Amino acid sequence: MHISILTFDGFNELDSLIALGILNRIKTPGWRVTLASPTPRVESMNGVDIARHVSLAEASTADAVLIGSGMKTREVVADTAIMAQLQLDPARQLIGAQCSGTLVLAKLGLLNGVPACTDLTTRPWVQEAGVEVLNQPFFANGNVATAGGCLASSYLAAWVIARLAGEEAAKDAIHYVAPVGEKAQYVEMTMKHIRPVL
């Protein structure tokens, strides 16, 4: 299984890297998690410079694709060259978006008639794109999921794991990263959000 996290210049570290860390808790053969970007290197909103693992074209062939958020998402969706590279298809892959990544899904036409989650800053732009925004941290409809709020990236990662490797694997991954003394509560809270849409 290949899971790729789309990461653009100005990316939010919490959205992309929390998901990356949780998804990499799965250690089964063939499980691969990558960061994808339109350029060989991207810089986060706080100056963290990272190298991509794969191109956007390769990410578009992944079994699951998560779209992280960032300060320049409106520039991304206005860039026809970047958007043309995103050949995503919920009929053949899981697709998720975090915060302003939801705007990318809206502009790709993957949220037509489907409500979505996003962060408070991005909310008006997603609404302008014709998408109903929910006041909750996570929602999924079929193979498309959205999350709102940086720490909701754990729900998005757990949803991908549950769909591709099973609920027990998702619980184990969240248990591993949850704070000591609060592990059971974190697992329960995460599963409360994702189980109804599995």
Image (tube, rainbow, N blue to C red):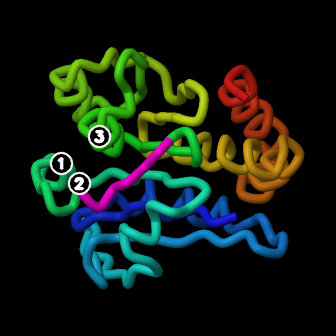
Note whether 33 is above or below 139 in the view shown.
Answer: below
Q: Residue at x 57, y 64 (%)?
A: 20
> Is there CB contact under 8 Å for labels 2 and 1?
yes
Q: Residue at x 21, y 61 (%)?
A: 82
Mark drawn on residue 108: 3
- Residue under pointer 2: 83
Q: CA distance from mark 2 to mark 1?
A: 6 Å
Query: Which mark lies nearer to you, 2 or 1?
Result: 2
Q: Amino acid at mark 1?
A: Val
**How many dots with numbers?**
3
On the picture, is 40 further left or further right than 77?
A: right
Please tell me which residue lies in front, 55 or 123: 55
State which quadrant residue 18 falls in: bottom right
> Is there CB contact under 8 Å for labels 2 and 3?
yes
Q: Amino acid at mark 3?
A: Leu
Mark 2 element type: helix
Please tell me which residue lies in front, 136 or 142: 142
Q: CA distance from mark 3 to mark 1?
A: 9 Å
Q: Which residues are magenta?
A: 83-89
N-terminal label among 3 and 1: 1
Quadrant housing the C terminus:
top right
x then y, percent, for residue 2: 63, 66
- Residue under pointer 1: 77
x then y, percent, for residue 7: 36, 64
